[in-house]
Amino acid sequence: MYTVKEIFSSLQGEGTHAGRVAVFCRFTGCNLWSGREEDRSQAICQFCDTDFVGTNGSGGGKFPSAEELALAIQDEWQSMNRSMSQRYVIFTGGEPLLQLDVDLIQAIKKLHFQVAIETNGTIQPPKGIDWICISPKDGSVLALLQANEIKYIVPQHHSIPNKSHIIQQMKRFEQMNFEHFYLQAMDSPALVSHLHLAVQLCKERPLWRLSTQQHKLLNLP
């Protein structure tokens, strides 16, 4: 059984594949926050801006089998494009690795999809994923030390940013096996100052690139 908040088509707005057409499958549930506002202040991840509670989103629901969920993802793709080529699905959440398994990966690949995930990196992924993006959270134990890209949100708290701590974290991640390194400003009422911070950090450590949330700038889902 797979519990899904929503399935929708859009453009990837962040990181290496920004601008690429994709179907997003957002699973319910996360291991770093319940998703309920009353629990946010006690959560490891306190800055999440995503609703991943319940199954009431577009295309959401409970899917008894991998094949049924794969077909729902295919239906969403075909609603915009009947082509068998360039099919791309991004499993996200919440934390997708609480539910994504080999059965689902195999089922969706039979329908000619490339598979991507956006994960907090605390759970080892099953085999067969084509693109892994890790967004690590301070205070969690990072289990996944290699991936296609890392996207580190700065700052990670609403208090005054501790720049030295952020640089220390960046240096730690630089020793791990990632192909692409991104900083992304935390979305909040202080977004402008967070963007200035992210830009300055990229200038100081040019291995890192700035990731912006293009889908929000374009008012995409």
Image (cartoon, grey):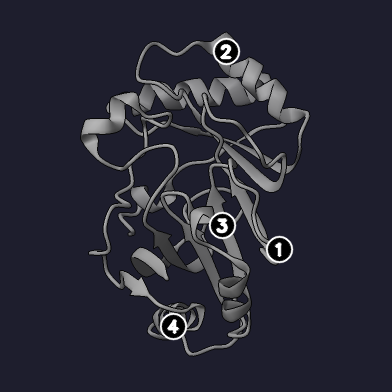
**How many angstroms separate mark 2 from mark 3 (CA)?**
27 Å
Q: Amino acid at mark 3?
A: Ile
Marking on residue 127: 1
Q: Amino acid at mark 2?
A: His
**How many angstroms separate mark 4 from mark 1 (CA)?**
20 Å
Q: Amino acid at mark 4?
A: Glu
**How many angstroms separate mark 2 from mark 4 (CA)?**
45 Å
Marking on residue 117: 3
Q: Residues within 10 Å of mark 3 (few under 14, many from 20)?
A: many
Depth check: 12 or 122 in front? 122
Depth check: 189 or 196 in front? 189
- Quick one: label 2 or label 3, which is nearer the N terminus? 3
Depth check: 4 or 221 in front? 4
Figure quadrant of the N terminus: bottom left
- Quick one: label 3 or label 1, which is nearer the N terminus? 3
**Residue topped by disc 2:** 165
In the rendered view, does 10 fall on the left or right side of 164? Answer: left
What x and y, as percent, mark residue 124?
65, 49
The residue drawn where x is 54% and y is 54% is: 97
Q: Secondary structure at mark 2?
A: helix
**Residue topped by disc 4:** 68
Q: Secondary structure at mark 3?
A: strand
User: Can residue 206 be seen from the camera position used here?
Assistant: no
Figure quadrant of the C terminus: bottom left
The residue drawn where x is 41% and y is 81% is: 72
